[in-house]
Image (cartoon, grey):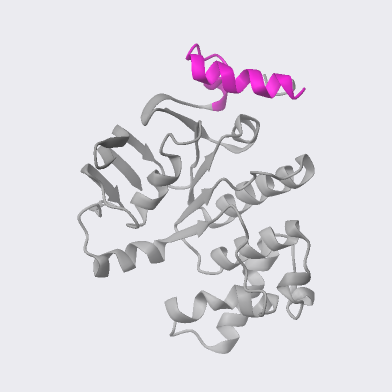
C-alpha cells in the first residue's frame, strides 16, 4: 500500500531523514514516534508531495510517486486525507459547509444529495449527526471541532489517513476520544493510517505497529507487545514516561 525505500531528506547540509525503509499495509494503523525535530512531520509531507525526497523512493499502490510532477501528485493527494493537530475549520461556515467544503472541488461529479450523504456519513463515523449541520463551527467545543475536522477528511473516503500530532495539548479524556476516532475511522473505511505522535500511551492503545525515529533514523519498528519489551534506550524512555503518568495498565 505505502512503502519507503531508502528515503533520505536533507535541507542544505542538514539531514533530516536517513535511509528510511518501511511499509504500511492496507488497513494498518502505524504510529510514528520520536522526539521533536526528528523528521516525523517531514515524513508525512513527503508522502503527499509537499516536500520532495533528496534520494530514495516512495511507492503507493504499486506506483513510484516520489518522482511525480505536481500535476501527477494531485491523484495521490486525492487518496490521502490529512488531519492536522488543530481543527482548522472555517469560522464563518457552519458544520455542513465545513465538511462539504473539501468534497466539492475533489468530487465535482457528485449531486447535492450525494454530497449530503457523504457529509452525514463522515459525521456519523465520528459520533455526530445531522442535528449539528447548522451549528456555527466557531461555537463548538474544541473536542467537537476535532471531530468535525476528521469528518471533513473522511467524507472524501481516503485510502490513506495521515494524522499530525492529533492529541498534542489535549486532556486525557479528549485524547482517549481522539484515539477511538482514529481506530474507528481506520477500521470502518479499511484505510491505512499513519499517526505522527510523541505519545507512547496513545500508540500502545491504538497502533497495529509502532515506528520509532531518532535523529532521522528508524531505531525500532514493532507491534505494541514487542515494543513493551524493547531494549532501545529511546523506546525505554517513552515507556518510562507512560509509567510516570501512572498509566501502568499498558506496561
Q: Is residue 102 found left or right of 138 in the rendered image?
A: left
**Which residue is nearer to you in this view: 180 or 16?**
16
Q: Which residues are magenta?
A: 224-247
Q: Residue at x 65, y 31 (%)?
A: 201
> x, y percentage for residue 86?
61, 56
Q: Quadrant of residue 115?
A: bottom right
Question: Can residue 118 be spotted in the picture?
Answer: no
Q: Is residue 87 above or below residue 230?
A: below
Q: Is residue 186 above or below residue 222?
A: below
Magenta segment, principal secondary structure?
helix
Q: Quadrant of residue 12?
A: top left
Q: Is residue 12 above or below residue 231?
A: below
> x, y percentage for residue 230?
51, 15
> x, y percentage for residue 63?
24, 54
Q: Residue at x 27, y 40 (%)?
A: 10
Q: Residue at x 35, y 51 (%)?
A: 47
**Is 228 one of the magenta-colored residues?**
yes
Amino acid at each position: 500500500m505505502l512503502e519507503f525505500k531508502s528515503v533520505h531528506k536533507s535541507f542544505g547540509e542538514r539531514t533530516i531523514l536517513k535511509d528510511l525503509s518501511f511499509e504500511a499495509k492496507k488497513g494498518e494503523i502505524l504510529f510514528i514516534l520520536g522526539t521533536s525535530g526528528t523528521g516525523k512531520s517531514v515524513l508525512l509531507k513527503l508522502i503527499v508531495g509537499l516536500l520532495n525526497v533528496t534520494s530514495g523512493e516512495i511507492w503507493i499502490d504499486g506506483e513510484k510517486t516520489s518522482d511525480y510532477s505536481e500535476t501527477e501528485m494531485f491523484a495521490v493527494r486525492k487518496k490521502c486525507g490529512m488531519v492536522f493537530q488543530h481543527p482548522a475549520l472555517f469560522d464563518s461556515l457552519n458544520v455542513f459547509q465545513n465538511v462539504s467544503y473539501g468534497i466539492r472541488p475533489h468530487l465535482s461529479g457528485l449531486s447535492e444529495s450525494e454530497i449530503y450523504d457523504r457529509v452525514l456519513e463522515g459525521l456519523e463515523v465520528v459520533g455526530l449527526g445531522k442535528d449539528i449541520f447548522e451549528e456555527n463551527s466557531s461555537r463548538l467545543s474544541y473536542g467537537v471541532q476535532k471531530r468535525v475536522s476528521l469528518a471533513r477528511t473522511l467524507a472524501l473516503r481516503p485510502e490513506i489517513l495521515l494524522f499530525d500530532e492529533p492529541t498534542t495539548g489535549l486532556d486525557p479524556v479528549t485524547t482517549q476520544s481522539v484515539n477511538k476516532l482514529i481506530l474507528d475511522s481506520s477500521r470502518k473505511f479499511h484505510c491505512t493510517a499513519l499517526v505522527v505522535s510523541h505519545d507512547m500511551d496513545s500508540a500502545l492503545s491504538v497502533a497495529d505497529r509502532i515506528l520509532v525515529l531518532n535523529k532521522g533514523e528508524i531505531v525500532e519498528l514493532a507491534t505494541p507487545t514487542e515494543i513493551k519489551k524493547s531494549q532501545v534506550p529511546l523506546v525505554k524512555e517513552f515507556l518510562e514516561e507512560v509509567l510516570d503518568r501512572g498509566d501502568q495498565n499498558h506496561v
